Image (cartoon, rainbow, N blue to C red):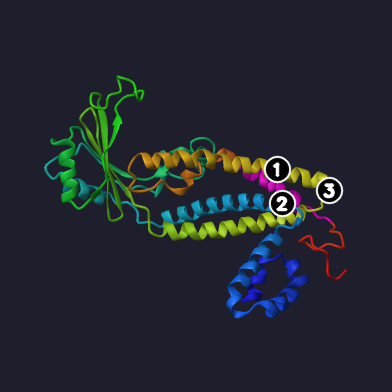
Amino acid sequence: MHRWLLLAYPRDYRRARGAEILETVRDVGSAHRRGRVAANLVRHGLRARLGRPASRTVVAWAAVFAVVCGLFAASFGTWLAWLGSRPLDHRDLAAVVGQLYPDRQVSHLDQDDPPAVFLIYGHPLGEDLLSELLLGDGGEYALAELTASFDQAPAGGLTDLRQRLDAAGWERSAPVHTDAYGCVPGSPQCDPASIPSDITVYADRGDHILAVQINAEGSMSLALSRATPAAAYPAGLLAFALGTLGGWVLFGWASRRTEGRHPLVQGPAKVLYGVAMVFWAAPILLSAPLMLTHHLSEPHPRWHVPWEWLGQPTLSLPFLLGAVLLLLALGLAALPHRRPAGRTLAGAPDPAV
């Protein structure tokens, strides 16, 4: 097992010191300390990948890059799981409306299935809409849903709606009241008891999410969408682990490649990395608190998809700029150079000298 754990170290380090490390482990690694020895091997190996043994901040910078890479990878993994979810069927919407209101005639009912799991401006994402997604209108990229409406809300209002949802086996949340027009919170004119409001009730049953809105003007609308697929959770966790590890390894490669290089290489590489991390991390630091506040302020039978917590694709332009800067930094790190003969890739004295 310990031989496999040596993969945590850079290749040149393993070649130079692998046999010595394994011999030391066999001498001191008793059975009851095997787990501790393994953990130390991995910890020191991951640190050795970063090089720069005298640096006190390289670990922090590597951790920032690795975690951000892990978050983006988790979003991508979750997105892939969503694409494999069961598509919406307009017949399911018709069955839901017919079960809830068999005595009412709808004024609108979607008759076609959505063309994709996620839509932008009502269309699947394609080459013609890619620029819209990446350069300003990423907020329009949303989960597909089916809709129905009544011009006149059924009599009984919220009380009747609750009873019908309960009878049909839906698990409903507390109603959400939204002012029908702009109102300054705390002002005398903003009295919830006297101003009109829209009422939204969320309910879930199986893999369906139903949002029913009773509008202040007297109409009602229903929106049917999919619940988060079960595969999204393990896919997101696995992708986060792989993305974090990959980010650490990539940062370590660039760190070792720029260690001891000419200032004209090392300096720009550091600046490019720092600016790129600002472009990547700023949307996360801006969006995550707002999204958390939003989730805590009202019921959510389905949490927002992970990439929206990262400010994507709404703030995809900073992400693209950061990606370009990182590619330039990696390009500088990849430039050929001659390593001093008396140093290993990890920055330790070469035992052969």
Secondary structure of the residue carrying tag 2 is: loop
Viewer-nearest of discs 2 and 3:
2
Tell me the number on the disc at residue 56. Answer: 2
Q: CA distance from mark 1 to mark 3?
A: 16 Å
Secondary structure of the residue carrying tag 3 is: loop
Residue type, mark 1 in image: Leu
Furthest residue in direction left, as rendered = 103
Say which of 178 and 216 sits in front.
178
The magenta stretch spans residue 336: yes
Q: Residues within 10 Å of mark 3 (few under 14, many from 20)?
A: few
Ranked by sequence position, the earlier of labels 1 and 3 is: 3
Residue 291, above or below 244? above
Secondary structure of the residue carrying tag 1 is: helix
Q: In the image, residue 339 lies at what x, y percent?
A: 84, 59
Residue type, mark 3 in image: His
- Residue matched to label 1: 272
Say which of 23 and 240 sits in front.
23
**Magenta highlight range:** 319-337
Could you tell me which residue is drawn at 45 percent across and 38 percent down?
290
Q: CA distance from mark 2 to mark 3?
A: 21 Å
Tell me the number on the disc at residue 342. Answer: none
Could you tell me which residue is drawn at 61 percent across and 49 percent down?
64
Is residue 343 visible to us here? yes
Image quadrant in which the C terminus is located: bottom right
Q: In the image, residue 79 lies at what x, y percent?
A: 46, 52
Image quadrant in which the N terminus is located: bottom right
Ranked by sequence position, the earlier of labels 2 and 3 is: 2
Could you tell me which residue is drawn at 21 percent across and 48 percent down?
96
- Residue matched to label 3: 262
